[in-house]
């Protein structure tokens, strides 16, 4: 087991090396205000047999979870996914059972919408995939999503089933509940399982002791880096300076400095403080319109001319978009949209929610930029969505979560970012772009009462508590009408007077 | 009087009808070009997309929600050509409207013995009806059906049996529901009708065999054969060309569909309620009888059996109106374009109807018919755009109310058609025997 713990100091001026102390191979942090990335890598041999066997059924498995609570992302951790649990995977051909749903229900959420039918393709939907010309092609990889506000179930499952009396493991599992994002990546080619969590610091900073790995497990290593983001030396690189400590061997933190090209990049200085917020135009009705507004509006300028502004939407099955609506240029222009680049998943225009087997749909929408003076321009993009009928319930409305989309500039990039130690892939939208694409994320607005990065839509449903007489009422009226008409038919014609009595009912 | 002068000239009425559609078409082009809100019906984009697939040698069913015969996409093939050709389909549908109106005019003249002015007046219910003109110029294909159904009626009245059979088979292939007309046409085609009216007075020994033999007259057999051959022939050709998706989308979809989205049908709320999975296990609701599965029974009994049997020999066009009215009112799905299906028969029925003769009845029927829709639309708007949960009682009650109004109107229509017999004294004997 290899642990790599990286702290990215939020405010470099507040950091002093005295906040790090190495004693007996362990590292103490004293009031360190830094974002923590905790990455644990297991080789397959280190895993319990049961878990290893079940992992082998996947050709590839990537789970990305993001919290619904807003957090500030600092480089190199600027990549984002919509709040909730995203699973992307490739299966081994022989396996067709409900492995995916078992995984979701056992580890994350026993109530998640996932019907364990015979074929996971029904629940999961293809990932975006483009060929060299940028055209959408069939993808072997599938995706699944469910809105999951917290990792409580996963954390308790982990500590009660896999931690086997290791208090450090249990602590780590419990700490997942504070994480802003959490990734699990399984790649058979490297025979490793990697768990990565990202956590913002407690208000007083990190006060913690990171112990050296136990000497009776010689394979284990723990590496801790405390870094600050350095000013930009090269436009496509990210540079960091700070201290690295390999717990155990190192007697003191070693100074370090390095730079690497990055796939996910912060906004340039010209767009500093730019943020978006998502909301639904009210009343939402059955056709809610997702509105993405940017502020300060004047900062909404492309980092370079190769860039396009995109929103990646993850829509639970209750929500869907009608791709045919996105074909009229006038309509798109009136919504500040350029085009619907891709859509995959449950896009049936008529089906009610309960007959849709898929988790939902994912869409990539290119947003239009204000043309001239961005300061006065309307910088709100509107994405028209529709609601499916939801099951009748003993209430008038059912709440449906609409996770905020991921909004980013996609730009051309000259260098290959794969050497970056913080490179994060399989987020669901990169495959919709050419390999040499750089993502500059527009963060969601955190201030002004943004309590969570998810909007809840009240969907009107048939209230069963008031519908007790619907069945008998309907049938009664239909039978009476039928009988009445039969009576008119059988009673014969020729009596015009009778019409006068009948008139209209 | 200026109005009667207007209706005195067929040129005037038809020019106005054409002009009305031309204005709507041009206005539609204008609105589509300059407004993100489109005049063109969403279905028209479905048809034209399907035509584009056909032009590329693919199946029209590659277009989501294309649930029609491939013939429709073929008919509007020119819409795939560039520029103005996109509107070809709408022009075709509008021309179809006019042809329908012209056939109505001819039928009224020839078979209802109307004067030219009177015939034009009643044909104008269709020709100058803004609702009809809007539907076709927005690009909905419902109006096109008017051509086939009216042509069918004309061919039947003219006793062109082979042509009638062909049109019936074609119409059923096109839109399924016209199969109900098969029943009334066949029942109407009795020997008296074929050989002139006097023969019914000659007393003949009545036995079951004799009745069967006289029922299976050559005309009935020919009509049945022609319509079946046309219907199955078209299906076989389409199946060979487009395979399973053709059957699935043009037929099976319509047979098994449960339209949960709110519509005028009285069954709508019940279908939503009973098809929806029970989310709350704790509240033990009483088990449903699932009687909505039998919804086709009253609908088909009325529209395809009872109404044809009791009425068609008295007045075929009005019987077809009553059948269509019953079919639409008792259908599990009902939207306003379905109203066009029965509107195309109004010109034959209205002239001698209670609705026109007794003004109070006619006006109250019209007001109630409109009010029923207004009430429903208001509830639907509250649901669709304001998100109010108006399913119960609002939408349910307004759907039921509209259904009750429709039933009342249908009752008047049925009684009117029945009483025609009494006035003219035709063929009461046959019906009476049947009843006994």
Image (spheres, coloured by chain):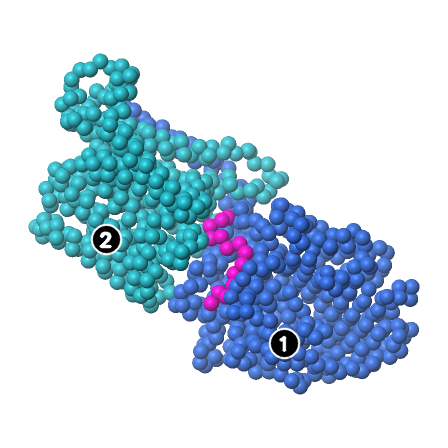
Chain A shown in which color?
blue
Look at the image and tell me whether residue B415 can be seen.
Answer: no
Q: Observer-nearest residue: B18 or A55?
A: A55
Q: Quadrant of the C terminus of chain B?
A: top left
Q: Which residue is mark 1?
A: A265
Q: Are marks 2 and 1 in contact (CB under 8 Å)?
A: no
Above or below residue A282? Residue A241 is below
Q: Using the image, tell me which numbered label, if any, was put on residue B95.
A: 2
User: In the image, residue B35 lies at what x, y percent?
Assistant: 35, 66
Answer with left or right where residue B267 lies relative to residue B22.
right
Residue positioned 13% across, 53% down in the render: B12
- Which picture quadrant has residue A227? bottom right
In the drawing, does residue B169 fall left or right of residue A275? Answer: left
Query: Color of chain B here?
Result: cyan
- The magenta segment: A339-352
Q: Residues within 10 Å of mark 2 (few under 14, many from 20)?
A: some
Residue B277 visible in the picture: yes
Q: Which element type, helix, strand or loop, lies under badge 1?
A: strand
A347 magenta-colored: yes
Where residue A91 sits in the image (x, y, percent)? Answer: 66, 55
Q: Residue drawn at (42%, 48%), measured in percent from left and top?
A: B242
């Amino acid at each position: 087991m290899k642990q790599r713990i990286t702290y990215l100091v939020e405010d470099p001026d507040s950091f002093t090396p005295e906040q790090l102390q190495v004693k007996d191979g362990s590292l103490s942090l004293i009031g360190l205000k830094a974002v923590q990335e905790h990455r644990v890598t297991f080789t397959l041999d280190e895993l319990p047999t049961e878990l290893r066997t079940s992992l082998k059924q996947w050709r590839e498995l990537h789970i990305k979870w993001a919290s619904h609570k807003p957090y500030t992302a600092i480089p190199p951790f600027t990549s984002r996914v919509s709040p909730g649990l995203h699973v992307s995977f490739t299966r081994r051909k022989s396996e067709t059972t409900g492995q995916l749903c078992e995984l979701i229900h056992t580890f994350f959420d026993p109530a998640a919408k996932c019907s364990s039918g015979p074929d996971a393709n029904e629940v999961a939907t293809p990932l975006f995939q483009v060929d060299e010309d940028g055209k959408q092609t069939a993808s072997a990889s599938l995706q699944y999503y469910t809105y999951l506000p917290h990792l409580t179930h996963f954390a308790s499952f982990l500590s009660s089933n896999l931690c086997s009396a290791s208090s450090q493991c249990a602590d780590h599992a419990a700490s997942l509940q504070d994480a802003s994002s959490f990734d699990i990546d399984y790649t058979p080619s490297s025979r490793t399982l990697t768990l990565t969590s990202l956590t913002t610091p407690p208000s007083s900073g990190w006060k913690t002791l990171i112990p050296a790995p136990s000497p009776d497990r010689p394979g284990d290593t723990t590496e801790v880096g405390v870094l600050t983001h350095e000013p930009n030396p090269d436009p496509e690189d990210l540079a960091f300076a700070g201290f690295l400590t390999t717990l155990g061997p190192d007697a003191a933190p070693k100074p370090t400095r390095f730079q690497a090209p990055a796939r996910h990049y912060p906004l340039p200085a010209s767009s500093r403080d730019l943020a978006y917020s998502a909301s639904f135009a009210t009343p939402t009705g059955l056709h809610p319109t997702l509105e993405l507004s940017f502020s300060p509006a004047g900062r909404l300028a492309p980092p370079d001319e190769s860039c396009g502004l995109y929103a990646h939407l993850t829509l639970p099955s209750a929500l869907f978009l009608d791709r045919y609506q996105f074909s009229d240029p006038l309509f798109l222009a009136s919504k500040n949209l350029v085009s619907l680049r891709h859509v995959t998943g449950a896009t049936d225009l008529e089906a009610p929610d309960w007959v849709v087997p898929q988790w939902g749909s994912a869409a990539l929408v290119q947003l239009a930029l204000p043309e001239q003076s961005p300061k006065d321009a309307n910088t709100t993009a509107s994405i028209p969505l529709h609601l499916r009928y939801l099951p009748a319930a003993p209430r008038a409305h059912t709440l449906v979560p609409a996770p905020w989309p991921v909004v980013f500039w996609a730009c051309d990039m000259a260098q290959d970012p794969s050497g970056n130690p913080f490179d994060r892939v399989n987020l669901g939208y990169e495959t919709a772009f050419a390999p040499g694409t750089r993502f500059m994320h527009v963060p969601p607005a955190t201030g002004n009462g943004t309590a969570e990065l998810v909007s809840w839509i009240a969907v009107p449903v048939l209230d069963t508590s008031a519908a007790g007489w619907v069945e008998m009422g309907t049938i009664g009226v239909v039978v009476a009408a039928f009988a009445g008409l039969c009576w008119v038919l059988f009673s014969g014609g020729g009596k015009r007077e009778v019409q006068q009595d009948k008139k209209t009912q | 009087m200026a109005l009667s002068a207007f209706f005195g000239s067929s040129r005037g009425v038809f020019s106005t009808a054409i002009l009305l559609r031309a204005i709507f078409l041009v206005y539609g082009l204008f609105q589509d070009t300059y407004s993100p809100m489109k005049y063109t019906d969403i279905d028209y984009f479905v048809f034209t997309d399907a035509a584009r697939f056909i032009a590329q040698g693919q199946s029209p069913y590659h277009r989501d929600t294309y649930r029609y015969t491939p013939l429709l996409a073929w008919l509007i093939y020119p819409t795939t050509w560039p520029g103005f050709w996109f509107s070809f389909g709408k022009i075709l549908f509008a021309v179809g409207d006019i042809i329908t109106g012209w056939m109505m005019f001819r039928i009224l003249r020839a078979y209802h013995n109307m004067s030219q002015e009177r015939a034009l007046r009643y044909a104008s219910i269709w020709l100058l009806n803004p609702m009809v003109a809007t539907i076709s110029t927005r690009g909905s294909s419902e109006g096109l059906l008017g051509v086939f159904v009216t042509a069918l009626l004309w061919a039947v009245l003219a006793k062109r049996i082979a042509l009638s059979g062909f049109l019936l088979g074609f119409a059923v292939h096109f839109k399924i529901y016209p199969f109900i007309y098969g029943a009334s046409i066949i029942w109407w085609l009795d020997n008296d009708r074929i050989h002139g009216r006097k023969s019914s007075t000659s007393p003949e020994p009545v036995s079951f065999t004799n009745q069967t033999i006289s029922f299976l007259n050559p005309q009935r057999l020919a009509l049945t054969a022609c319509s079946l051959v046309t219907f199955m022939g078209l299906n076989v050709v389409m199946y060979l060309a487009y395979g399973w998706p053709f059957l699935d989308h043009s037929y099976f979809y319509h047979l098994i569909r449960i339209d949960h989205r709110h519509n005028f049908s009285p069954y709508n709320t019940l279908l939503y309620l009973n098809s929806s999975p029970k989310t709350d296990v704790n509240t033990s609701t009483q088990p449903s009888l699932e009687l909505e599965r039998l919804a086709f029974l009253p609908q088909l009994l009325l529209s395809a059996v009872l109404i044809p049997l009791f009425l068609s020999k008295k007045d075929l066009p009005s019987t077809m109106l009553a059948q269509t009215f019953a079919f639409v009112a008792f259908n599990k799905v009902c939207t306003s374009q379905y109203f066009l299906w029965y509107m195309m028969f109004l010109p034959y029925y209205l002239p001698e109807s209670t609705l026109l003769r007794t003004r109070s009845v006619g006006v109250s029927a019209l007001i109630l018919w409109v009010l029923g829709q207004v009430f429903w639309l208001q509830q639907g708007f509250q649901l669709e755009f304001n998100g109010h949960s108006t399913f119960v009682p609002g939408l349910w009650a307004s759907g039921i109310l509209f259904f009750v109004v429709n039933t009342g109107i249908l009752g008047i229509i049925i009684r009117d058609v029945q009483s025609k017999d009494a006035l003219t004294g035709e063929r009461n004997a046959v019906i009476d025997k049947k009843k006994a």
